[in-house]
Image: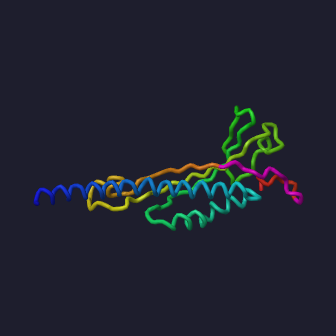
Amino acid sequence: MAEFASYLAILLALALALIDIAAIPARRGQLESISARIVHQMSMQDRLSSSRKVVDDGFQLNQSVASFEGVHIKDVNLTLLAISRQGDRTISLDPHKAIPSDWRPDGANCPCTYQLNLKVDANIDPLFTAPIARPKIPGLNGPVHFAIDQSSNWENLGRDPYTGQFYINE
């Protein structure tokens, strides 16, 4: 009976370790899914300024991630990527600044494909934390750092009839 108890303790320890390890990819998958949904919603906005507001406020992303434990967002970064139709020219743009005239939908490098890229830096905690003081081992007694990149094509290339500006440049 004593042999059985030691084998059962080892089996239980291995089962807990596997459950602990499985929680990190599950949480990462949830974070990727939420990030993909949010960047797609931002790409469907009327104006780029509305999409910037979602990231600048951070409310929607933090609210969605707060629905499950163990994920802590460190940084969120939004960029706009313009790719020429031939694919030979690409430029990464800051969505807080105006798009250069050559890269606007009626510019010299266009027609272009515009992509919103959302980069989320997050720490994901393991399900169980081992009581080891030093050193911090990611996934065992400390969080694992992940950088999630999601992108979606910008849909609205029209102009505002009142201002004459492209919606992607407002």
Q: Is residue 25 left or right of residue 150?
A: left
Q: Residue furthest front?
A: 1
Furthest residue in direction left, as rendered? 2
Q: Residue 128 at x, y = what percent?
A: 33, 62
Q: Is residue 135 above or below residue 103?
A: below
Q: Position of residue 16 (x, y in %)?
A: 30, 58
Main SS, magenta residues:
loop
Residue 115 in the figure: left or right of residue 132: right
- Tell me what residue is drawn at x 56 percent, y 55 percent: 33
Q: Tell me the quadrant of the picture where the C terminus can be found.
A: bottom right
Q: Residue at x 79, y 45 (%)?
A: 104
- Determine if the magenta segment contains residue 158: yes
Q: Nearer the viewer, residue 4 or 143?
A: 4
Which residue is painted at 76% across and 58% down in the image?
A: 47
Q: Please report the bounds of the magenta region as a residue range.
A: 152-162
Magenta-drawn stretch contains 38:
no
57 relative position to 127: left or right = right
- Looking at the image, which is closer to me, 67 or 119? 67
Quadrant, the N terminus:
bottom left
Q: Looking at the picture, how far across and down is residue 105, in whole percent?
A: 80, 44
- Report the side of 150 relative to 88 (left or right): left
Q: Image height check: is 108 above or below 72?
A: above
- Residue, x 69% and y 52% (percent of image)? 95
Q: Position of residue 147 (x, y in %)?
A: 50, 50
For the residue pair 112 and 152, the one nearer the viewer reads as: 152
